[in-house]
Amino acid sequence: MQGATLQLGKFWKIGERLGGGGFGQVYAAAGGGEDAAVKFVKRLPGAQGELLFVDLGEARNVVPVIDQGETEDAWVIVMPQAEKSLRDLLNEIGGAGLGVGAAVGVLTDIAQALGDLAGRVVHRDLKPENVLLVDGRWCLADFGISRFADATTAPDTRKFSKTPLYAAPEQWRDERATSATDVYGFGVIAYELITGRRPFVGPDVSDLREQHLHETPAPLPNVPVTLAALVMECLYKQAEARPAATDLERRLDGVLIPAATAGLSRLQAAHHEQVGKRAEEERSASRAASASERRERLLDAARQNYLSISGTIRASLADAAPSPAAIPSPRDGQWTMRLGQATLRMTPPITASTDRWGDPGHPLFDVIAVAEIGLRIPAGRNRYEGRSHALWYCDALEEGRFGWYELAFMHNPLMARTSSVAPFALGPGPESAGALSSGMDVLQLAWPFTKLTGEDLDGVISRWAGWLVDASSPGWSQPSLMPEVEIPWVWRR
């Protein structure tokens, strides 16, 4: 590439490579007595080249595009050659921070650009590498690059359309970026300029996701309260709560001016305190939203998995005994099969309550959904009506590893209580929590946690087939001894 001549609107002689990133390579260039930088942006499936060339009109402090075009495999943008990037400046000062006055100067330049562009175009990837010193002003570069990446259909490019150290919470959730997303990036840059360190440092991408979504940055030390409040507001988790991009410049204008009166000084301090409280509220709300989204994803997985398990059990039983009356399996996994006087039924899964256990001392695992499998017969002289087992989608055995488990409960023999259904199903709650505790309780586990997968599922099918045969005959009664099998303490407590 170096030494080649490129014809766009005019001829450019390509010089040394200046740098590059996820979307392109940058080279020095010269043409018509003008020094410039040429960026080659690789073509991406689904993304159109015109996305790169946004008309920014008279917006202040934006690196202009002075020529453009394309090659066989790349879109080409020609820009003025910058003196340095903001990252270069931060590297020069070695992590000490610029100082409040100098930081406010840089931030004002950035704020002017964001204010002028608000409502027209979103950068999506604001970071020091994209802030360049051109003609004595700190200017934003690469408008259009992230937009171009966001439009692509290529599966591996979206992860490059944000920089984890500067990405806003909504970007981690794959939500639509707005000007508030750029305000968040502005807040991260401001924090870094003032302190010499970023508000969140990872080190891994998973750590950064957790921090941007759920943690509050450390307070800014030795900074005017008006500036500290502005930066913390920019870093709010909820996009709608951040300052408007059009308001950043105005608020920066006054951060270095002492309050005119003691009362106003107290008001500034009180506002700063309220900003801190709001940041903590935002953090808590973001954590709750993430937990809710996680449960929704797990619930979807539980339903899909249940359909497969329920269908497998039903098909196996129907193949072995095709003549018994069976209701076809609907989409939710519920079905009923009758043999003689016995009715075997699987219920559809329902969502488990988030405050599932109720009392303290409950098991440590999480239950996402519950269902039931059971056998019923008409109540005879002994009033016995059958048995039912609970089906829980949970991570009972290993934290974070969810699956469907079969289990059942019984009354503690020492409590002299009986039930017409024994053993019986329970959902997560105070009663089942007591049965799963290490102490003696009114209830206890009657059937151990049994996975509904692989060989375990084959055993489940065989067992319920045998019980269906037994229940179809007159005189079927509850087990003479419960628990019927050994109950190992495998669940997390």
Image (tube, rainbow, N blue to C red):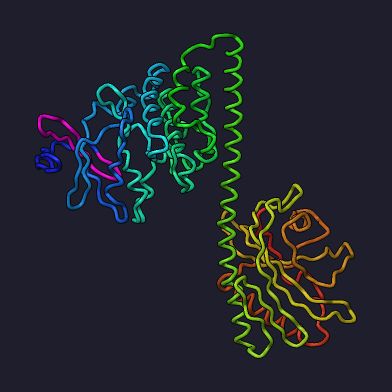
Q: Residue furthest bottom?
A: 323
Residue at x-position 52% and y-position 29%: 233
Count the marks: how many?
Answer: 0
Based on the picture, tell me whether residue 460 belongs to the magenta stretch: no
Give above or below for 248 relative to 306. Answer: above
Residue extending furthest toward the front: 57
Q: Position of residue 94 (x, y in %)?
A: 35, 24
Residue at the spot 64% in from the left edge and 65% down from the top edge:
405
Closer to us: 265 or 336 = 265
Q: Nearer the viewer, residue 40 or 259?
A: 259
Q: Is residue 35 one of those drawn in magenta?
A: yes
Instruction: Report the predominant secondary structure element of the magenta stretch.
Output: strand
Question: Which residue is at the front of the view, 322 or 350?
Answer: 350
Q: Quadrant of residue 83?
A: top left
Find residue 455 and report its horizontal and vertical position in percent. 57, 73
Which segment is the magenta one?
A: 20-38
Give me the residue at 44% from left, 31% from top: 245
Query: In the image, residue 51 lies at what x, y percent?
Result: 31, 46
Q: Is residue 466 left or right of residue 137?
A: right
Q: Position of residue 305 (x, y in %)?
A: 57, 67
Q: Nearer the viewer, residue 162 or 449?
A: 162
> To which quarter of the image does residue 420 belong?
bottom right
Image quarter where the N terminus lies is top left
Is residue 305 shown above or below 470? above
